[in-house]
Amino acid sequence: MRSTIVPAPSALQTVDRSASHPAIRWIGANVFLMATTSPSTLPMQANDPCWCGSGRKYKRCHRGSEGRVVAGTVSPMRPVPEHIGRPPYALSGRSVRWDEPRIKSPDIIERMRGACGMAADILRLAGEAVRPGMTTDEIDIYVHDLTVERDAYPSPLNYNGYPKSVCTSVNEVICHGIPDSRVLVEGDIVNLDVTCYFGGVHGDCNATFGVGEIDAESARLIRVSDECMWMGIEAVVPGRPISDVGRAIENHAKAHRLGVVRAFVGHGIGEQFHSDIQVLHYYSPASTMVMRPGMTFTIEPMITLGSWQHKLWPDNWTAVTADGTRTAQFEHTLLVTETGYDALTAGPGAVSPSAPWSR
């Protein structure tokens, strides 16, 4: 799960996504019923009632947006067994950042290996379960259960009020997609972002999966996004500025005529879900932090078929590409070593175990 310049909702906000998505109809008790897919026959005239049942005119509602992801019903937060250790924000929904050392102790690093290995395992299992006909809420249930079965806490749950245990970002959704009642269909792509809190530390990783058979362009996007992440990872060298990471990612994306999202960045990680290190996925001369052995952070580029610019849904979480084109992402948690890096969420059994050119 990546850091962002966009403010998150407060813990006291209710997840009500009807404000700008009129395909949602209120049926009581903060439950919304909506049409999530367009019909085979669309309204003939702009002033006809929209097919979604909102009561609005077609031209004011869904004209021009058919085929894009729309919000579904968000179910209540799932409970976590009492015996499981929780991060400080778990009950309040408020994450208060403190001055965590950038250089981790051997004890913290060892604990992070455990949390990261667990997250990588859960991500693989969740990806293997993705299929047409399932909802993203069903993915959330599966990830939640896999996490608590391992006596771990799903880090996204109630982080600044986020209502679910995993992020599910479909098609043009860049990141922070909230699992809901939307059904995955053949040809979709979906990013799953899994983070575990275990042993007092977090482990964070994500990957993008095809839903059934996908088109060649989407497959290329997924492949190059994985490559971009590893280009950034291989630029991790102690004593070098962290801008090397963004330069390597941006150069590879541009070579394939793909965009790199700028609003969301990799982040420091350890005892906190997000600490003060920021990892830009594009080159900026202002990104001058020198990488040192013992630092831990994520590299998680978001790569697009079109524009790198984004729009944010009123839920203050779901970010989508401004032009509606598809986007893909991969993420690993990294440790800077004396000679290079250790990808703590990679290795045998991971979705992206090593650089594609080394497999």
Image (tube, rainbow, N blue to C red):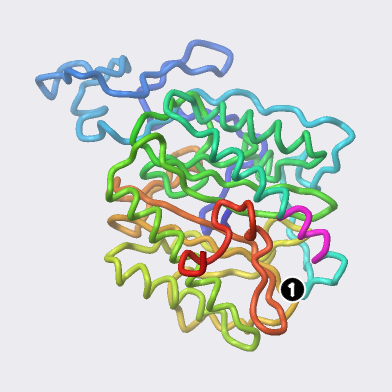
Expressed as whole percent of the image width and height from the top left, the position of residue 319 reads 44, 47
- 233 in relation to 226, above or below: below
Image quarter of residue 347: bottom right
Q: Amino acid at mark 1?
A: Arg
Say whether residue 115 is magenta. yes
Q: Nearer the viewer, residue 53 or 293?
A: 293
Q: Nearer the viewer, residue 223 or 19?
A: 223
Expressed as whole percent of the image width and height from the top left, the position of residue 96 reads 74, 54
Q: Mark 1 = which residue?
A: 102
Q: Residue at x 76, y 41 (%)?
A: 153
Segment colored magenta: 109-116
- 116 in relation to 85, above or below: below
User: How many labels, in total?
Assistant: 1
Say whether residue 63 is magenta. no
Q: Nearer the viewer, residue 320 or 27?
A: 320
Look at the magenta stretch and give its main secondary structure.
Answer: helix
Label 1 secondary element: loop
Question: Label 1: how many residues lie within 10 Å, few (<14), some (14-19) or many (20+)?
Answer: some
Image quarter of residue 140: top right
